[in-house]
Amino acid sequence: MDNIAIVAITKHGVELIRDLSTSMPKADLYYMKKFERGDEAERNIHLFEGSIRLLLPDMFKKYDGIIMVISLGAVVRMIAPILIDKKMDPAIVVIDDKGEFVISVLSGHIGGANDLTRVVASYINATPVITTASDVQKTIPVDIFGREFGWVIEDFSNVTPVSAAVVNEEPLLILQESGEKTWWKHDRSLPKQMKVVQSYEEAVDIDFNAALVITHRILTKEQEQKLLTNGVLYRPKSVFLGIGCNRGTCMEEIKSVIYETLKEHQISIHSVKSIATIDLKKDEEGLIQVCDEFGWEFLYYTAEQLNAISIKNPSETVYKFTGAYGVSEPAALLAAGVDELFLEKKKNGNVTISIAIKK
């Protein structure tokens, strides 16, 4: 997290944050004008008069994290009127005036305050104070589960009750059909009340109070009822689209083929990670625009790289125009790093699409 402000309102606090800034050079410093040292303009330090409370509404909009050397009670009273939502509020961290404790106050998980607290404590040799139950108990943080891998939660409605079930050690089903498997980060075995399965068929006969579902699939109504009544659905970035198209194919046609193909195969568009193609198409505007709109990676490979991948349907016609015996199929395989395609090849108008899924 680079977009951070550090605030102090006392003499000792100013000393502390000026020292801290050497470890966090990208952070913006704010302190009262009466503690001016003369180098503030040179160091781009913000000086203010009056109460920091007046600056906080704008700082909430501007920064991802705010570190304050102010008493915890005062900070709570100042920020209370301007809180919106844990998905929008910045991370708030408090340091005591002697620099002995660093306290995670707000947006601990989603906003990153817990991680920021640990980092700041390491810089000033202080004790980090984190009260989030999942961190204290070393269990699964439901609201940010898989975030380091790019997983996204499809619906936040059940995050709070499912989190309660996790920290209360109730029976938990974890159904993972795709996505990274290295999500358990703690130095102890997975608790016995957590059951991990790899398919819905395995989950049917298991009793559970809450569920975490990690899948690229669009669930059936029956599966949603079974798994998501008290469950959270995560979309891992495990789907890779190989695409070939005629020169000048517009974005709307490419999007239409993608939507239609994913719907046909019951795959969530939220699990797409990238579009891959041949390097002859690296400047293809339609492909670039689709990737920009969805925030997908745009990957491209040389004909030699594509020809090194074995495919079932090599095409002499494609080779004649591109130097590769296939584009969409080997590109999808290369992007996903797998040996088998989920969808070999589908041609629709000016677009050819293949799908690879990394499980």
Image (cartoon, rainbow, N blue to C red):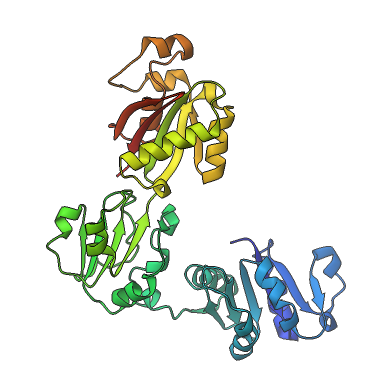
Q: What quarter of the picture does the N terminus occupy?
A: bottom right
Q: Nearer the viewer, residue 176 or 40?
A: 176
Q: Is residue 25 left or right of residue 215?
A: right
Q: Residue furthest bottom?
A: 73
Q: Residue at x 53, y 26 (%)?
A: 249
Write the residue at 48% across / 37% down. Answer: 255
Above or below 279: residue 342:
below
| Residue lying furthest left | 205
Q: Where residue 254 sits: x, y (%)?
A: 48, 32
What residue is rendered at 37% in x and 51% in y?
236
Q: Position of residue 250 (x, y in %)?
A: 55, 30
Q: How many numbered callouts?
A: 0
Q: Nearer the viewer, residue 157 or 5?
A: 157
Would residue 352 be visible to someone looking at this image? yes
Q: Nearer the viewer, residue 44 or 346?
A: 346
User: Which of the 4 image quadrants contains residue 308?
Assistant: top left
Q: Quadrant of the C terminus?
A: top left
Q: Position of residue 248 (x, y in %)?
A: 57, 23
In front of the other: 98 or 299: 299
The location of residue 20, given as percent across then percent down, is 66, 71
Residue at the right extreme, as displayed:
38
Location of residue 298 with respect to 294 vertically, above or below: above
User: Can see residue 19?
Assistant: no
In this rendering, the answer to whether 336 lies above or below 36 is above
